[in-house]
Image: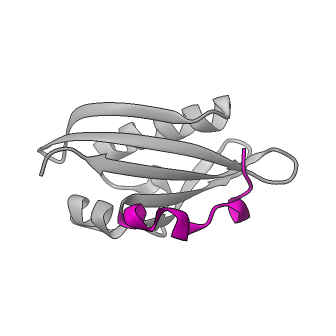
Amino acid sequence: MPHPSAIDPLDFDFALSLVSLIDVIGPEPRYYLRLVGPDVADRHGRDFTGQYVDEIDEEPVRRLLIPSYGKVYHTREPFWALRDTYVEGIFWQYEVLILPLADESGAVIRLISMIQYLHP
């Protein structure tokens, strides 16, 4: 797993508006949304940047994010999914890729997520 400093956002500047950075906090991990891409925030009608996932007031959003982030954290492997779901009364079809990033000891300390919406 790469260290967060090994990731250069300019390498994927074409997708930055669809990228989110998630800090992994503590041994029971909590997931802190360090940065949510503007296109992702626009799709949800709000920006979750600066929030812990478990404190997001929309339960369907928590129900999708916590297990996905947890899978990457616990397996230490990338996660990809093609999803069809309803969130906030809206049909969402999208692909998501979540990658783990590690510190010098190999502990997962951050996740990077990219989402590509397939329907407007």
Q: Position of residue 79 (x, y in %)?
A: 51, 34
Question: In the rendered view, would you say 91 is above or below 30?
Answer: above
Q: Position of residue 84 (x, y in %)?
A: 22, 32
Name which residue lies at 33% across and 46% down.
Answer: 61
User: Is 18 part of what is drawn in magenta?
Assistant: no
Q: Which residues are magenta?
A: 1-17
Quarter holding the N terminus?
A: top right
Q: Position of residue 34 (x, y in %)?
A: 53, 66
Question: In the rendered view, would you say 79 is above or below 20?
Answer: above
Decide if residue 48 is in sight here. no
In the image shown, does 10 or 114 lie closer to the viewer?
10
Please, what is the dominant secondary structure of the magenta stretch? Answer: helix
Name which residue lies at 48% across and 40% down.
Answer: 66
User: Is 2 part of what is drawn in magenta?
Assistant: yes
Q: Position of residue 80 (x, y in %)?
A: 45, 34
Q: How many marks?
A: 0
| Relative side of 20 to 47, left or right | right
In the image shown, does 71 or 18 lie closer to the viewer?
18
| Relative side of 90 to 8, left or right | left
Name which residue lies at 46% across and 59% down.
Answer: 20
| Relative side of 41 to 13, left or right | left
Question: In the rendered view, would you say 67 is above or below 88?
Answer: above
Question: In the rendered view, would you say 32 is above or below 35?
Answer: above
Name which residue lies at 68% across and 41% down.
Answer: 28
